[in-house]
Image (cartoon, grey):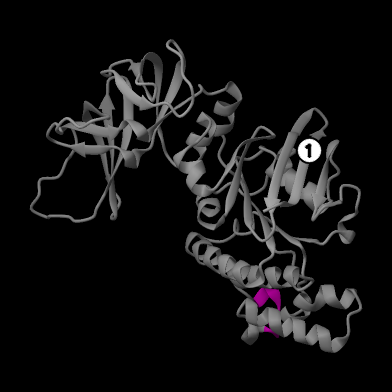
Amino acid sequence: MPAFLQFEGISKAFGEVQALRTVTLSIRKGEIFSLLGPSGCGKTTLLRVAAGFERPDEGRVRLDGEDITELPPNRRRVNTIFQNYALFPHLNVGENIAFGLRVAGRPRREVREEVQRMLRLVQMEDQVHKKPAQLSGGQKQRVAIARALINRPQVLLLDEPLAALDLKLRQRMLIELDMIHDEVGTTFLYVTHDQSEAMSLSDHIAVMNNGQVEQVGSPLEIYEAPLSSFTAAFIGDTNFFDGTVMEAVNGEYSLLGINGFPDVLCFNDRPRTVGDLVHLSLRPEKLAITRERPPHRLHHNVVNGVVEDVIYLGSQTKYRVRVSEYLLTVLRQHQRTLLDEQPITWDDGVWLDWHADDGYMLERYRERDEDLMSLPPNDSDEPRGE
């Protein structure tokens, strides 16, 4: 499918802060595409470039084949939803939704019919006469979505749209957003620092870091096959080990030397050379934990360690296991629990087992990556010059 919204070599600086560094992305028509990354990574600036609120220093923006780089915001078939909703407090729900069509001078009958269509879409028919102050956060968000969609934009830009909502409401709104998208088929460009939002909603994700795109792919590709240590660390939890490639095995695998471990077998997702320094990334749920040493199995790695922490989470238990200088996180899913079974607990000696295909050899962190990963996320990137 050809690209519908394209960013071609976009760069943007705010004084000495380089917010975007030659960003190139292609977004397909009708998909939900997320820009994901920590505060200051450039995702909101890229969204504002798409909306026309910021002009890039370099590069072009194309929508459905048309170069829109120089077009002002009001001449782009693009609408934006902000995290503060930006509803008019003196207008009721119906009037807020109708605002864009009335400004455009559309006939009253058409406005009335379109407002009714939007009210049905966002399930707000019974709230039409209420003012924004009388609505919950989720209801305000639905009104903002309806107001943005009533003009039938080619692209809907969503800038941290759920950041102001509590956890359960965010989870419900994600489902509603997905249903609304399926109904209208509009291309969504979604900005978030919340990886769970991006993973659950998106067709494709661009992980951004320091004004650049680290990786583009489906949620499955981003999580299961990260291309960089930054992506592996930012998307979900992972265990990192510093290792050295010691030996090639049948061309498909490498043996890694890791301090305090027996030789570790890992699949060569990319060409490796003996002596290469790598990060081994291993997701917590890929590790099996047992009291007894597991039987030998082809292409499996086995190490022993000591449990330092146990966190019961209902559907699963999280273990922290000391192996040499490393403290590993292990997740054990509760498919079936026997109450008379002796549980693994603190100070127990345990064995960890994983398949060689489940580890990924990545490059070492760049210094800038470590700085960004130490920053707590906030609701907006703009104050940091993003």
Residue 186 location, x and y as percent?
A: 69, 65
Q: Is residue 382 above or below residue 165?
A: above
Q: Quadrant of residue 203?
A: bottom right
Q: Residue furthest top?
A: 275
Q: Nearer the viewer, residue 319 or 21?
A: 21
Q: Eyeballing the image, is 237 above or below 124?
A: above
Q: Is residue 21 left or right of residue 223?
A: right
Q: Which residues are magenta?
A: 128-134
Tally the numbered discs: 1
Quadrant of res 217: top right
Q: Quadrant of the C terminus?
A: top right
Residue 188 percent coordinates (x, y): 67, 59
Say which of 101 and 347 sits in front.
101
Q: Is residue 333 left or right of residue 350?
A: right
Q: Is residue 382 magenta?
A: no
Q: Is residue 144 above or below residue 357?
A: below
Residue at 32 percent of width and 24 percent of height: 265
Residue kind at label 1, given as amino acid type: Ile
> Residue shown at 53%/24% (left/top)?
365
Residue under pointer 1:
10
Q: Is residue 105 left or right of residue 361?
A: right
Residue 212 in percent (x, y) is at 68, 34
133 magenta-colored: yes
**Residue 81 is at least partly visible in this image:** no
Residue at 28% across / 16% down in the picture?
Answer: 260
Instruction: Establish if 353 lies above or below 129.
Output: above
